[in-house]
Amino acid sequence: KHAQVVRTFDGHGHTKDGHAIAILANVGDTASAREAASANAEGVGLFRTEFCFLDRTESPTVNEQVEQYGGVFAQFSGKKVVIRTLDSGADKPLPFLTFDNEENPALGVRGYRTAGRAPELLDEQLEAIAQAASAHPSTDVWVMAPMVSTVDEAEAFVESCSRHGLNTAGVMIEVPSAALLSSHILTSARFASIGTNDLTQYAMAADRLMGPLAQYNDPWQPAVLQLIDAACKGGKLNDRPVGVCGEAAANPALAIVLVGLGVSTVSMSPRAIPDVAAALAAVEYKKCLEVARTALQARNAREARRAVRAALPELA
Ligand code: PEP
Ligand code: MG
């Protein structure tokens, strides 16, 4: 029997030729943050705060929130934590924030749109984040809003954050409109994080929860890759960092493509970190650029995947 090879990550993501790519973790509570820290994640790229309150019928108090967020910040002293404001609705309903009577909840009042209906909840959450951040001054806290689809929303969110002294405010790019408008969005937003799960769902008009639609819900779809490319170009124009925190980042070959498209961070479930880190460390940056071009030019997801795999003997 072969001994099982257990890969570990040393905490410094890079390509073979030393181009730095931060490898971050997606977490939802203190327990998963602990797991991420022991996987040597370079920080948290997505803290899904709604996961702290999924079973709640009443909105959490500011103090309760401070405690939850502080628990995660404490695990990443000296590192970055990107905390996302509540992303409620569709696949993640919060009874105190979203209604279940919408006909098309994925296209309804979800994500940042709930701030229009309940501005006081966003305000309380930003207050809680600011308090937890000042209780953990050595954690670099970045804040972002989910499901932003217009430039006005991005500007309003950044403004709300600054009222709470939260100056590193950004947005998720997970709606095609936001990807296409990223050059404008990223003049006010300090960073963007691409949510490929929703970006794929909305680009392909395919409910991400429907198994029979899995062939559409595939981030290798060239249309999705073109939107990611557009988002990265907006980042480059404004000299703002763009990362990916959707499931796509957890696929080693696709992570290489994402780096070639211009993302500077990839964030994933802690379990995926060692394989993605090893894949990136095996390829030159130039190769990332090449396979990104290959993937962008493909006619369908199958061709994109096949052509990229064929160009990456390093991963075999
Ligand atoms: C995404 O949509 O890719 C994402 C990271 O957010 P969530 O999966 O929480 O909707
Ligand atoms: Mg999403």
Image (cartoon, rainbow, N blue to C red):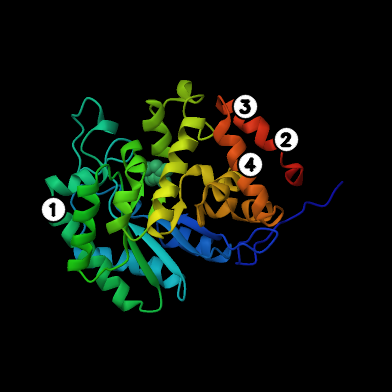
Quarter-wise, where is residue 163 in the image? Answer: bottom left
Q: Nearer the viewer, residue 183 or 208?
A: 183
Residue identifier under label 1: 119
Question: CB atoms at circles 4 and 1 under 8 Å apart?
Answer: no
Q: Position of 286 compared to 154: left or right? A: right
Quarter-wise, where is residue 122 in the image? Answer: bottom left
Q: Position of 226 compared to 10: left or right? A: left
Q: Residue 310 carries which label?
A: 2
Q: Residue at x 20, y 29 (%)?
A: 102
Count of marks overlaid on the render: 4
**Quadrant into which the C terminus falls:** top right
Q: In which quarter of the image is ligand 2?
A: top left
Amino acid at circle 2: Ala
Amino acid at circle 4: Val
Q: Distance between the residues labelled 3 and 2?
A: 10 Å
Q: Which of marks 1 and 2 is in front?
A: 2
Q: Distance between the residues labelled 1 and 2?
A: 50 Å
Q: Residue 291 carries which label?
A: 4
Crowding at dot 4, Cα within 10 Å, few <14 / some 14-19 / many 20+, comes out as many
Q: Residue 177 carries which label?
A: none
Extreme residue in the right direction: 1
Question: CB atoms at circles 3 and 4 under 8 Å apart?
Answer: no
Q: Classify mark 4: helix, strand or loop.
A: helix
User: Counting residues from the N terminus, which is met first, the one under dot 1 or under dot 2?
Assistant: 1
Q: Residue 303 carries which label?
A: 3
Question: CB atoms at circles 1 and 2 under 8 Å apart?
Answer: no
